[in-house]
Image (cartoon, rainbow, N blue to C red):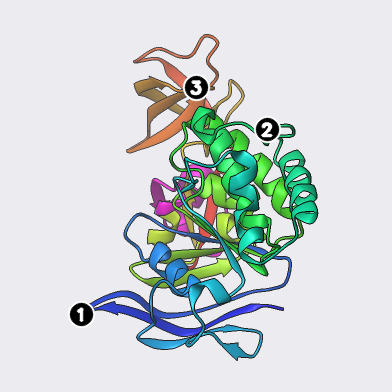
Amino acid sequence: MSLLLDGVDVRYGDVAAVSGVDLTVADGEVVALLGPSGCGKSTMLRAVAGLERPSAGSVRWDDEDLAGVPVHRRGFGLVFQDGQLFPHRDVAGNVAFGMRMHGVEAEARHKRVAELLELVGLGGYQKRKVTELSGGEQQRVALARALAPRPRLLLLDEPLSALDRALREQLAVDLARLLREAGATALVVTHDHDEAFTLADRVAVMRAGRIRQVGPPTDVWRSPVDVDTAKFLGCNRILPADAALDLLGVTVPGRVGLRSTALRVDAAGPLEGVVLERVHRRDHVRLLVAVRDEELEAVAPIAEPPALGDRVRLSVDPDGLAVLPG
């Protein structure tokens, strides 16, 4: 079983929100639609769910065109940014809601609720009021509710973006585990590349209504298809091949994208420069360093970082580089 998007357009009058999208999601696969706000990724998800009508192209499940299939008959589970739980129902009532709508018997519902709450780390929470839960707990309940009817496809629209950074990072790890343990087929919309790369088997980078690149997370991270994609994925500087060789000693077939971690303070490093700026981050110090005629970002350890005006030596960290087409 698989999802197929074939040349999908979504228009609002003269405005093209989504243009010519082709994408597949295979059985048991998690695909992330990754892009900046306003790029059309949530609109695309809503078209898959049946909440938006494509103006061209088709949304298919296996060989079935879903154009005439209403939302509640598509067999898809939905998880939104705010969870959209029912405040008048307890946790068990929320999780069991979809099963009740499908006529599942009470004993089977109770068993499935207990299984899913254990899966999402909320075992024993059946009688808790959802209004008494933290934001992270509420999203876990929303996920359990979406999984309860055993959907053939799970659609998640920015499921973690309303949470603070530390909680979002932990829940991304937990969600990745949950999706795999549940054997879920899922399409996840997010603007956060850390989240996408944690969750997905494949990442589809979207910009201005179109999918620009699709591939395994490592391939997309190391080889962005163009400059705009590289910048969205954290490459603050793009150097042509000759400059990369001359400045960094790096030989590549195309251009080189430098992330903030591409250069690191290293007493034995081959490069030398002067610290122009210094900013403390959670787990490192970010520097701006004048190297020859260039101003480049670099990172230093928090313990005894260099001061403004200090001369530092730098080494190249390959994990901070991306290679773009020439």
Q: Residues within 10 Å of mark 2 (few under 14, many from 20)?
A: some
Q: Per the image, is 68 magenta?
A: no
The residue at which mark 2 appears reads as 125
Occupied quadrant, residue 278? top left
Q: Residue 262, position in %: x, y?
A: 52, 39
Q: Nearer the viewer, residue 159 or 151?
A: 151
Q: Is residue 47 visible?
A: yes
Q: Residues within 10 Å of mark 1 (few under 14, many from 20)?
A: few
Q: Which residue is mark 3?
A: 282
Residue 67 position, x and y percent, is 48, 87
Q: Nearer the viewer, residue 159 or 71?
A: 71
In three-dimensional space, the C-alpha distance between marks 1 and 2, rounded to whole angstroms, equals 47 Å
Q: Residue furthest front?
A: 106
Marks 1/3: CA–CA distance? 45 Å
Circles 1, 3 touching at the beta carbon (< 8 Å): no
Q: In what element is the residue under mark 2?
A: loop
Dot placed on the residue nearer the N-terminal end, 2 or 3: 2
> Which residue matches tag 1?
13
The quadrant of the image that shows the N terminus is: bottom right
Q: Earlier in the sequence, mark 1 or mark 3?
A: 1
Image point 39% across, 82% down: which residue? 54
Specify start and end residues of the magenta stretch as a single range: 232-253
Q: Is residue 244 left or right of residue 288?
A: right
* Magenta residue check for 251: yes
Picture quadrant where residue 140 is located: top right
Q: Which is nearer the N-term, disc 1 or disc 2?
A: 1
